[in-house]
Amino acid sequence: MTRNALTLARNPFGQLVFTDDDGKTHQITPVRAFPIAAPTENIGLINADGEEIAWIGRLDELDPTTRTLLEEEMASREFMPVIQRILRVSSFACPSTWDIETDRGPTSMVLKGEEDIRRLASPALLITDSRGIHFLVRDRYALDGHSRRQLDRFL
């Protein structure tokens, strides 16, 4: 399929619909293959049966309207705040409550155990809180000194 042939729209219920080359419509969910390492590349369009019906190599190859539809849909189902600062940690034993600043504003989270901090491609970390929310640290070395010291006690 060529990138220009990709036809997406919203149905009356607000769901994303893909029309294939045969004119058949499919309700789809866009899924990133590598959401952290390559968020704008390799996106599968998955139908209601869990089957991949189309593949998008790069978002920047799409027309602006189609790209906006896909980005809006992915943003509505993906929630991964990026930690910018660690303000306070209640205890260095788990569980502990962390007061943090994220790209979406200040919040607090509860870290159940050190195993909930996953190392990704260096220097990134993925921290899962007690509610199952994933917080991303893009570059732990780029954090301010206080935040790095707080984090290092759990690594």
Image: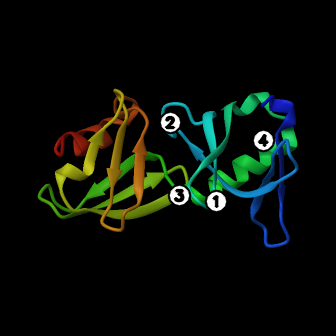
* Res. 122 image quadrant: top left
Label 2 packing within 10 angstroms: few (<14), some (14-19), many (20+): few
Please name which of the two marks, 3 or 4, marks the residue nearer to the observer: 4
Q: Residue at x 18, y 57 (%)?
A: 113
Q: Is residue 146 above or below residue 89?
A: above
Please name which of the two marks, 1 or 3, marks the residue nearer to the observer: 1
SS at mark 4 in the image: helix
Alpha carbon distance from label 3 to label 4: 26 Å
Please name which of the two marks, 3 or 2, marks the residue nearer to the observer: 2
Task: Identify the image's colour scheme: rainbow, by chain, secondary structure or one colour.
Answer: rainbow
List the residue tagged with mark 3: 105
List the residue tagged with mark 2: 34
Disc 1 to disc 3: CB gap under 8 Å: no
Q: Quadrant of the C terminus?
A: top left
List the residue tagged with mark 4: 67
Q: Position of residue 32 (x, y in %)?
A: 56, 42
What kind of residue is marked 1?
Ser
- Mark 3 / mark 4, whichever is N-terminal: 4
What kind of residue is marked 3?
Gly
* Res. 151 image quadrant: top left
List the residue tagged with mark 1: 76
Of residues 125 and 68, the one nearer the viewer is 68
Please name which of the two marks, 2 or 1, marks the residue nearer to the observer: 2
Alpha carbon distance from label 2 to label 1: 17 Å
Of residues 69 and 104, the one nearer the viewer is 69
Alpha carbon distance from label 4 to label 2: 17 Å
